[in-house]
Amino acid sequence: MKIKVQSLVGVLAIALALACTTASAKGCLKGAAAGAVAGHVAGHHAVVGAVGGCIVGRHLANKKASEQKAQAAVPLNPPPVQTPKSPVKN
């Protein structure tokens, strides 16, 4: 009975892992690493530093992505502006 329960838990865990979409961790890993080091040096608060670093790193990554998206929306070579032709005087 105990083996059946463990097998069921294992199958459910695998099913949940496969069903979940991949998370975007841009900026979080770098921020967490830097925050963990800073938190450890500041007084053995590596976990708190990692969480804070992850939040800040994710925010900066989102900000950079939105700036790149806005920059991509601006055309590099805008079309020339057509000016009305003035009548030629003889």
Image (cartoon, rainbow, N blue to C red):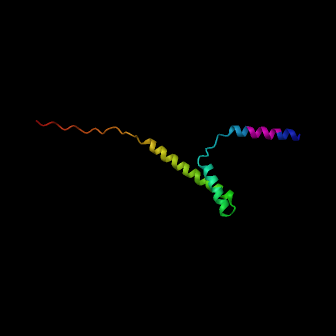
* Quarter holding residue 34: bottom right
Magenta stretch holds residue 9: yes
Residue visible at 79% across and 40% down in the picture: 10
Can residue 37 be seen here? Answer: yes
| Residue 56 versus residue 24 in the image, above or below | below
Residue visible at 65% across and 57% down in the picture: 37
Question: Residue 57: image x %, image y %?
Answer: 58, 52
Question: Residue 35: image x %, image y %?
Answer: 63, 56
Can residue 54 be seen here? Answer: no
| Residue 17 versus residue 53 in the image, above or below | above
* Quarter holding residue 79: top left
Question: Residue 51: image x %, image y %?
Answer: 65, 55
- Is 10 displayed left or right of 38 in the figure? right
* Quarter holding residue 39: bottom right
- Is 2 displayed left or right of 33 in the figure? right
In this view, the residue in front, 35 or 23, is 35
Q: Which residue range is magenta in the image?
A: 7-14
Quarter placement of the N terminus: top right
- Is 18 displayed left or right of 7 in the figure? left
